[in-house]
Image (cartoon, rainbow, N blue to C red):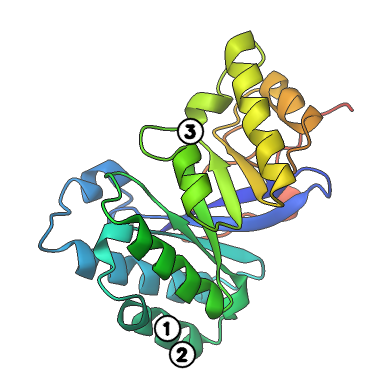
Amino acid sequence: MAFQPIIDVKLKRIYAYEALVRGPEGQPASTILSEVTAENRYAFDQACRVKAIEQAAALGLDRRLSINFMPNAVYDPKACIRATLAAATRVQFLLDQITFEITEDERITDTAHLSGIISEYRRHGFRVALDDFGSEYAGLNSLIALTADIIKLDIGLVRDIDRNERQRIITLGMIDVCQRLDIDVVAEGVERREELDVLTGAGVKYVQGYLFARPTLNRLLKDEDIAFPKGP
């Protein structure tokens, strides 16, 4: 796993770390995910959860941990969560410090089933995020049907938001809806100060992207490592 900080821009500190799958020699996620099939999806999903928790604990992570999971790999929420609970107990990682990010690389075929997964996870103290919100499959229908704690704005909504008025109006509208629903917003893929200014001006508190930090293998960046932009 590589770990990328999610930044609290108001407090100027790291709020959480997202665990991102990598190959044993640091190969990018795409080379690993391309090997995932219907047959091995469940085993892969379970292995990633356990590895993320174990490695985060070994590195002394003391903030929230975000773990991606594949909703179509979960056949029974109670059964599929056992390995996660066991790993967290074994390394003494607090359950209420874990956020599960729903990755929608494929269309969700059973919304009621996913809603059941979210309810079970939240019952254990986990927070749940909708990842890549605003991308191909993750949109307003998901927000209506699912009770998420966090939405992560897709990079397509964030990149060049200061330069595209139509994109800016739509994205700021989504942010306003989430705020009204008491859902936290994380902006992904922030790379430029101008993008950050638009997002923070709309009340976004949490951001993630190369403007602040890249993912790191086998270590966790600290607050003092973060490249906070200068100025107001």
Q: Position of residue 65 (x, y in %)?
A: 56, 64
Q: Residue at x 47, y 52 (%)?
A: 145
| Badge nearest the viewer, 3 or 1 | 3
Residue 54, picture quadrant = bottom left
| Residue 164 in sight here | no
Residue 51, picture quadrant = bottom left
Q: Which residue is mark 2?
A: 90
Q: Position of residue 170 (x, y in %)?
A: 60, 22
Do the residues bearing badges 2 and 1 touch, measured as CB atoms within 8 Å?
Answer: yes
Instruction: Tell me the crowding category of disc 2: few under 14, some 14 to 19, or many 20 or more residues within 10 angstroms, Cα based.
Output: few
Q: Amino acid at mark 2?
A: Arg
Q: Which residue is mark 1?
A: 87
| Residue 12 in sight here | yes
Sequence-first tag of 2 and 3: 2
Residue lying at the far left of the rendered structure: 39
Q: Position of residue 13 (x, y in %)?
A: 76, 52
Kindly report the distance in space between the C-alpha atoms of the residues bearing marks 2 and 3.
37 Å
Q: Residue at x 67, y 14 (%)?
A: 162
> Up-down: is 174 above or below 79?
above
Q: 72 or 18: which is nearer to us?
A: 72
Kindly report the distance in space between the C-alpha atoms of the residues bearing marks 2 and 1.
5 Å
Q: Secondary structure at mark 2?
A: helix
In the displayed structure, does residue 90 sit left or right of residue 220?
left
Q: Which residue is mark 3?
A: 134
Q: Secondary structure at mark 3?
A: loop
